[in-house]
Image (tube, helix red, strand yellow):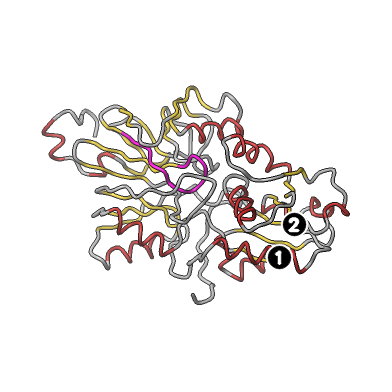
Amino acid sequence: MAGKNCNNPSYISEMRPQDILMPVAAGLCCKPGGFHIDPVRPVERAVITHGHSDHARAGHGAVLATQETLDMMRLRYGDNFAGSTQAVRYGEEVGLGDVKIKFHPAGHVLGSAQIKVTCKDTCIVASGDYKDAADPTCAPFEVVPCDVFITEATFGLPVFRHGHAADEVKKLLASVALFPERAHLVGAYSLGKAQRVIALIRQGGYDKPIYLHGAMESITDYYVSRGIDLGELRPAIGATKTELAGTIALCPPSSLQDRWTRRFPDPVSAFASGWMRVRARARQRGVELPLVISDHADWDGLCATIAATGASQIWVTHGAEEALVHWCTMRGLEARPLGMVGYGDEDEGPAEIVVEAEAP
């Protein structure tokens, strides 16, 4: 598209959505705007949907994101994670080259955003990661009408119906009451999932101190600094086994199997993830108490969101692309997979599609 410009009327009349956004090796590229969305390698200008490491990488020339996402990147990568930064508020419109962008809440984690890209009369929304379920720790998901909707498909199979997160927390609290001599270790992703689980535990009526792995502390402290009440939190390091009996502690999923767990008395291993819908994965990880709590939309949420946007074209990325494309085409929508790589659950590596799952 070299030499063409959105201010040229003849060009506008010919413009297709793929002339505005297209998948390239670095990520979604907007040539008319001179930026990439969630690029997987350093670029001149990056627009970042949220702070998870598979979407927010260091080394870009300039980064545009919500203030919370910029702060999260600074916590993780240091002050010099980008050449320059610009904070964008939800609903604020920013002009980049020949397009306009606007950030809308994605409901995924604190500061997460969908990116609305508009050139003339064509509107494309890149969802990033999103969920339509309630979350007390971040702004709720907002449906954004558009011509083209770019949706994730992490849990894009009908088997993935997550249910209510509060019911999963009830299972955890029931186990704590049943085994007062044991500690309960909950594996949860450090950004977003851990803080949501803590907030849900508090909503479930648990008011005792909750212990944190050291890797959780800085991000959780940041959530608290943004006015999110998580109750009394304590570092697990330094606490005795006697003090830890009957408590709840949160840690990264990778820590459930390492020496860190030895400080806890006869721990119950739990893992909060949408992947816990698959019993084989829970068994493989040695999880005693699987908790189906996800920060991604499940199958019903994906389908409902696609319908609600009113988009006539659906582009599907990172996840079970083919199943969701098939669902769309059966309903008369034009849909295609983007086949982009480098995205997945940040504490588990790239997401894999699991076909061995129990019936819904």
- Is residue 109 part of the magenta span, yes or no? yes
Q: Could you say which is closer to the camera, residue 150 or residue 303?
A: 303
Q: Quadrant of the N terminus?
A: top left
Which residue is rendered at x = 75% and y = 63% of the image? 268
Q: Are marks 2 and 1 in contact (CB under 8 Å)?
A: yes
Local SS, label 1: loop
Local SS, label 2: helix
Q: Mark 1 sits on what residue?
A: 286
x, y percent for residue 322? 38, 63
Q: Could you say which is closer to the camera, residue 245 or residue 275?
A: 245
Distance from Cα at disc 2 to Cα at disc 1:
8 Å
x, y percent for residue 133? 47, 56
x, y percent for residue 186? 69, 56
Q: Which residues are magenta?
A: 101-112
Determine the image quadrant of residue 132.
bottom left
Q: Mark 2 sits on what residue?
A: 257
**Which is more N-terminal, label 1 or label 2?**
2
| Residue at the limit of the structure toward the left, as seen here | 10
Three-letter amino acid code at the position of disc 1: Gly
Is 152 located above or below residue 329 in the figure? above
Which residue is rendered at x = 77% and y = 56% of the image? 247
